Image (cartoon, rainbow, N blue to C red):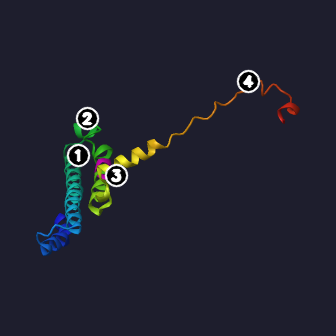
Amino acid sequence: MTALFLRPILKILGEVGDVRSEGQISLEKTKWLTLLGASLAVISSTALYINFGLWVVLGGAGKPFYANPYLHVMVFGVNLDSVLNDIGMLLACGVVKKITCESVQSIFSTAAAYKVEPAAPPVFDSEAYNKPDSESSD
């Protein structure tokens, strides 16, 4: 499965040779993120299938795969697999390729530059409900 994602990238990198260009560096990042993302998705799904098999074979009332929420495939396994597959596909599709330490730091430093002054505290009138309607319409 992972080779299916990597085959076109490796073909292009093989044709380029040892020339270090911005495009080749970007393509190498794509290669590693694709490898990591596809591997994460495949490994997490394999772990889910193994967990499901153990749950079916060794499950039952009072057994560890039934009683322990971390071993129960329907409680923890399916949800963990879903989250890891989402992360793996985000890595494989290249969304996080542009994220660097500098870009994350600039986001937080920009947010810190805009300070919001607190507004004046609200004034509460504890007698508001005791006043007649004519006074409260002012």
Residue at image location 86% in from the left, 31% down from the top = 135
Q: Which residue is mark 3?
A: 103
Q: Nearer the viewer, mark 2 or mark 1?
A: 1
Q: Amino acid at mark 2?
A: Gly
Let me know if residue 79 is in the magenta part.
yes
Residue 42 figure quarter: bottom left
Distance CA(mark 2)–CA(mark 3): 50 Å
**Which residues are the magenta region?**
78-82
Residue 31 figure quarter: bottom left
Distance CA(mark 2)–CA(mark 4): 58 Å
Q: Which residue is mark 4?
A: 126
Q: Earlier in the sequence, mark 4 or mark 1?
A: 1
Distance CA(mark 4)–CA(mark 1): 61 Å
Q: Earlier in the sequence, mark 2 or mark 3?
A: 2
Distance CA(mark 2)–CA(mark 1): 12 Å
Q: Which residue is mark 2?
A: 62
Task: Report x, y in % for residue 64.
Answer: 22, 37
- Which of the numbered marks, if any, corresponds to residue 55? 1
Task: Report x, y in % for residue 136.
Answer: 83, 32
Please tell me whether the stretch drawn in magenta is mainly helix, strand or loop: helix
Q: Earlier in the sequence, mark 3 or mark 1?
A: 1
Q: Amino acid at mark 1?
A: Trp
Q: Amino acid at mark 4?
A: Ser
Callout 2: 10 Å neighbours few (<14), some, many (20+)? Answer: few
Q: Nearer the viewer, mark 3 or mark 4?
A: 3
